[in-house]
Amino acid sequence: MQSHHDVPALLRRLEIADVNPGATDGKAWFGSGDLLDVLSPADGRLLAKVQQAGEADYERVMKGAHEAFLRWRVTPAPLRGLIVREMGEELRRHKDDLGALVSLEMGKILTEGKGEVQEMIDVADFAVGLSRQLYGNTMQSERPGHRMMEQWHPLGVVGIVTAFNFPVAVWSWNAFLAAVCGDTMVWKPSSETPLTAIAVSKIANRVLARHGFEGVCTLAVGPGRTVGDRIAKDARIPLVSFTGSCSIGQRLAQTVAQRYGRAILELGGNNGIVVTPSADLDMATRAIVFGAAGTAGQRCTSTRRIIVHEDVADKLTRKLVAAYKTLPIGHPLDEKTLVGPLVNERAVTEMMEALEAAKKQGGQVLVGGRRRDDLGSRYVEPAIVAMPAQTDIVKQETFAPILYVMRYHGPLANAIAIHNGVPQGLSSAIFTTNLLEAEEFLGPAGSDCGIANVNLGTSGAEIGGAFGGEKETGGGRESGSDSWKQYMRRSTNTVNYTTKLPLAQGVKFEVE
């Protein structure tokens, strides 16, 4: 088996050069903007450089995407699905290399890097089936001799703005569904993780070129002021899918709405788990540790709050602290590592500031919370903090491995009130063996999140269900279920197959 530690060979296999143009219209690669150094958070090494997109480059990218849309939209959806299937097959062939690049560029451990690529493959498979299921309803007309139906048509060029923590999977959620729906796209990846975007775009465009559909998947690496702002303001882009912070997402949504565009927003998560007296504490411990420490706490669905009943709080806390003390921290490509680095030094600083704020608000750090400069400037120990209440710092999302533990007493409704008392509403879970408690948590007076689980953690959603959340999480939905409808426009059609012209609602309008 080829070694992923031979980084130059890995990059060559993925066609990543020392300096890489950061924009493509599907036919050629180019870039006239500033040069971007891409450093690995694992050890600070320079992986490669990217020549970012300038203003003229963005226009060239958009021209390619729009021209491709005019042909792609009239291509039968099942054929579009077959092309997406080929993309999935190509990703499968490159899974190990792409997974290693995700780990090197983002910092997540290798098994998670490969899992992210597998998620892309799975979404491609999902999209292939979807290409034959873009169903519209038929309705009964009140007028005799009339047929009513709805059709779903391609929308246009979709803007996809992704975050560093899932540098390729989130693109696939949008891109593969949009592609089978007949849309083309322009992708702005995070400036922290542009190499994975370039590698995936090259793979996708090789497949598209074989079928003569260059321009379906375009790319523009660049800062927000050059690329992101243009996508938000561009009336040629009817839909923008944005994954990122609440503050930036709010500004983007306002900009898109001003031009009557649509936005899919996947923003902050402050995900909580309720642990009741009847819970299986061993299972809860395993789920919490993965949810809170996995990906070094840098998932939108990372577990950040535990609301545990006072009767079992001490026992659960002891289990969690013991598990945290055994977590292997280190280089993400080391098979023994479970916690890799944070994405940059700013994230480390923000974690330390949050811990200090928690202490000032009555919190006690039970384990972890230290920098690990012996490993590198971006490594930290995941922390567990006992909090006396849900204070201001607990209500904020800190994108780092901090787990706040709070106690509740009395009925489950008290725990649900604490759980729902934060601005975000992405993922949630309850651990209980009581059927009534489980159903209460899932019911209308239960969790207010877009994702609610029973006896499993907040992290690691499957692609078949629509992913997204409520409140400051943005209300967006991606990937599964009927989220495909966001990438299409609905047309209601009525056909009169008679020689008469009756009006609806019994209106009479006769002209002699």
Image (cartoon, rainbow, N blue to C red):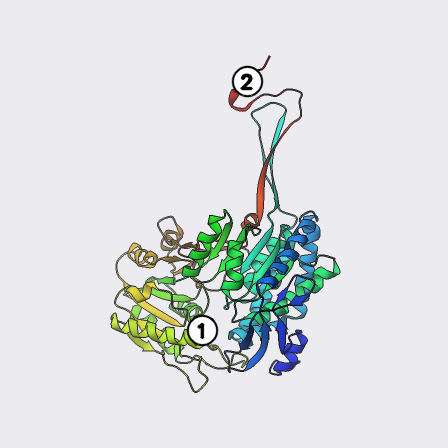
Whole-percent x and y of residue 448?
A: 38, 53
Location of the N terminus (image quadrant): bottom right
Residue at x 37%, y 78% (from the top left corner): 322
Q: Which residue is situated farthest in the top direction here? A: 512
Residue 216 seen in render: no
Residue at x 58%, y 66% (from the top left corner): 53
Residue at x 34%, y 59% (from the top left corner): 422
Q: Name the residue under label 2.
A: 509
Whole-percent x and y of residue 112?
A: 53, 71
**Is 137 above or below relative to 113?**
above
Whole-percent x and y of residue 325?
A: 39, 80
Residue at x 43%, y 72% (from the top left corner): 293
Location of the C terminus (image quadrant): top right
Looking at the picture, which amino acid does disc 2 mark?
A: Phe
**Is 36 above or below relative to 457?**
below
Does residue 360 appear to the left or right of 302 in the view shown? left
Crowdedness near tag 2: few (<14), some (14–19) or many (≥20) residues, C-alpha within 10 Å: few
Looking at the picture, which amino acid does disc 1 mark?
A: Ala
Residue 101 seen in render: yes
Whole-percent x and y of residue 211?
A: 74, 58
**Is 507 above or below relative to 476?**
above
- Of marks 1 and 2, which one's residue comes earlier in the chain? 1
- Choose top left, top right, bottom left or bottom right for residue 213: bottom right
- Choose top left, top right, bottom left or bottom right for residue 54: bottom right
Q: Mark 1 points at which residue?
A: 296
Q: Which of 121 and 354 is in front in this view?
A: 354
Q: What separation in Å lies between label 1 and label 2 (alpha carbons)?
A: 69 Å
Q: Is mark 2 on a helix, strand or loop?
A: loop
